[in-house]
Amino acid sequence: MSKHINPRRLRGTVAIRADGGDLAGLIADLNTSFAEFKASMSEKDKEVAKRFDDVVTTEKLERINASISETNARYQAEIDKLNARLAGLSVNGGGDDDGLSEADREYQATFEGWFRTGDGESQVKAAMKAGEITAAYEVGDDSKGGYTAPVEWDRTITDARVEISPMRRYASVQSVTGQGFTKLYNLHGTTSAWVGEKAARPETNGSVLATYAFAFGEIYAMPAATERILEDSEIDMASWLAGEVNIEFAYQEGAAFINGDGVNKPKGILRYDADTEAALPAAQRHPLGPIAEVLSGDANTLKPDGLVDLIYDLPEDRSQGAALFANRKTHAIIRKMKDGQGNFLWQPPFQAGQPAQVLGQPINELSGLPDVAAGTIPVLFGNMAQAYRIFDRVGMSVLRDPYTNKPYVLFYTRKRVGGGLWNPEWMRYHRIGVPTP
């Protein structure tokens, strides 16, 4: 049977001091060194603020820092020695003394009786509530009862952050029933002519129609879990796996809606610039052409004048419902911009639930867009619902497969989705760059 030290029996013990050092002295040294460190650090901060870096102060800081580390190491070593001595110490020992108080012995007899017969449960609980029992069944030793006192753990799982593009919030979403989706575009071309009363009327040209097939893809996941973990886990593993797959699908399709190349996946909104479209075969280009670009006016950053040019480049009849789109870092850059009179371009929303405004236009956060850098497109302006469309072929489908790879249960999950540019006339790119002279 294990012996336990009852704190109430340490009468007469005033202090226990390790042979190798004085804990109180070490603590005093540590506090003194830390006080010197704070004072020196404050002096260093003042020097930095004055753009003056004194080598003497730097060396002093390094010396104090080293002293703190050494003192702390000695202090920890003394604590370790003390813990070792306490663990092996027998207080009031000798003879056949088992180290248990009368209350401990009484509790042990009651507990063993309850363990064998099931009687006396209320007495066991009452003794435990009193907080005076140091029972021989050890939490630290599984074979002596530790299994009955497991470490408490949170029955939830905290997720690492996953950045998901909110394109579904801004673009149009359409359900389809076929293997894909093809849109018919009218390129106009109808001509007319003025004629006299009796003049001949030759045939005129009619409008030209063109089709555009939107890119689709299928995304899948197949996580596995053993039958035993599904049966015994404190967490609903099946639901947790389903949630993980849902987050992963949202991340993948969000990334595709922004920058997907259209190969077995949707084609992203950033993939319709003039150079990318020109590199495609004629049959694969968008019938209405690429998205027009407005340069920022600087080779490396955004400029207020560039944003003005961007907003007013969109025709009036295509500016209804238009908004600026940028990621969070670009928002921070725009928020610091001022006009020639020192007024901030960014203005808070007029009412709850509405986006902030820049130059009188709403500005929305769209993660997935690039940061501000030379040659990138960090800002979009236009009506995203009219410019980009998402197609859902079927919702997420899940097949639970306990047969293929026993003893694992496979959760085969799949989703078919498409996306692409609906009408480039409703959108403008804002690319970082300087106009060619």
Image: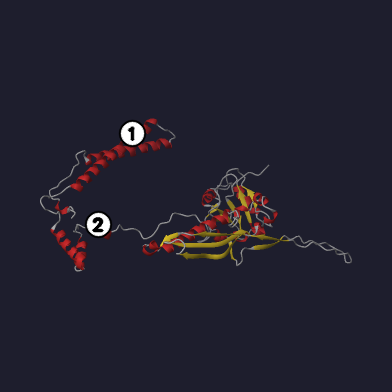
Determine which quarter of the picture holds residue 300. top right
Q: Residues within 10 Å of mark 1 (few under 14, many from 20)?
A: few
Q: Which residue is rendered at x = 10% and y = 51% of the image?
A: 95
Q: Secondary structure at mark 2?
A: helix
Q: Which residue is rendered at x = 20% and y = 66% of the image?
A: 116
Q: Give the residue type at disc 1.
A: Arg
Q: Is residue 203 left or right of residue 151?
A: right
Q: Is residue 414 left or right of residue 23?
A: right
Q: Give the residue type at disc 2.
A: Ser
**Which labelled disc corresponds to residue 143?**
2
Counting from the top left corner in percent of width and height, residue 122 is at: 20, 67
Q: Which residue is rendered at x = 51% and y = 65% of the image?
A: 397
Counting from the top left corner in percent of width and height, residue 211 is at: 69, 61
Q: Quadrant of the C terminus?
A: top right
Q: 269 or 35, which is in the foreground?
A: 269
Numbered circles on residues, count: 2
379 shown above or below 28: below
Q: Is residue 254 visible?
A: yes
Q: Which residue is rendered at x = 29% and y = 40% of the image?
A: 73
The numbered mark, 1 or 2, whose residue comes first in the sequence reads 1
Q: Is residue 356 visible?
A: no
Q: Residue furthest right?
A: 198
Q: Secondary structure at mark 1?
A: helix
Q: Residue furthest top?
A: 56
Counting from the top left corner in percent of width and height, residue 160 is at: 44, 54
Q: Is residue 30 left or right of residue 92?
A: right
**Which labelled disc corresponds to residue 63?**
1
